[in-house]
Image (spheres, rainbow, N blue to C red):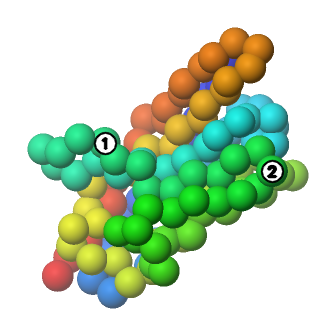
Amino acid sequence: QVHLVESGGGLVQAGGSLRLSCAVSKSVTSINIMGWYHQASGSEREPLATIITDGTTFVADSVKGRFTISRDNTKNMLYLQMNNLKPEDAGTYYCNAKILLPTRGDYWGQGTQVTVSS
């Protein structure tokens, strides 16, 4: 079982920045895949960025150059740095953890809300 708690959302003007945090209940380096997802109002949840066990990161083309995923192995924290925010970035952001072995598990946080004013 992995517990995830997001924080850092809020109201920001377009062009501004936010850093989202996700507190993880176990070692982040032991989790096969961690990521951030975005769900706009009325839309499906979509992956934004992931980081795998060895630290390799992947960022969706839609946010590449603006969003950066990182982790702090000593604090068991996952972060999403969001720069140059746009109104379409508004929505709920979720932290996700996927464990593949020995038993598959897919865990979600409760989400943190981001509002971007134009």
The tag on residue 45 is 1
Residue drawn at x 62%, y 43% is: 34
The x and y percentages for residue 5 are 56, 40
Q: Nearer the viewer, residue 9 or 81?
A: 81
View extreme (left): residue: 42
Q: Nearer the viewer, residue 60 or 107?
A: 60
Q: Earlier in the sequence, mark 1 or mark 2?
A: 1
Of labels 1 and 2, the one closer to you: 2
Answer few, some or many: residues within 10 Å of disc 1's Cα (few below 14, many 20 plus, some between 14 and 19).
some
Is residue 29 visible in the rendered image? The answer is yes
> What residue is drawn where x is 48% and y is 80%?
65
Label 2 environment density (alpha carbons within 10 Å; few <14, some 14–19, many ≥20): few
Q: Is residue 2 above or below residue 91?
A: above
Give the image location of residue 54, x and y in percent: 80, 50
Most extreme residue toward the right is 74
Q: Along the horizontal axis of the image, is 72 left or right of 47?
A: right
Query: Of the residues shown, which amino acid type is indicated by label 1?
Result: Arg
Three-letter code, disc 2:
Asp
Can you identify the residue that label 2 sits on?
54
Give the percent coordinates (x, y) of residue 24. 68, 39
One can see residue 112 in this view: no
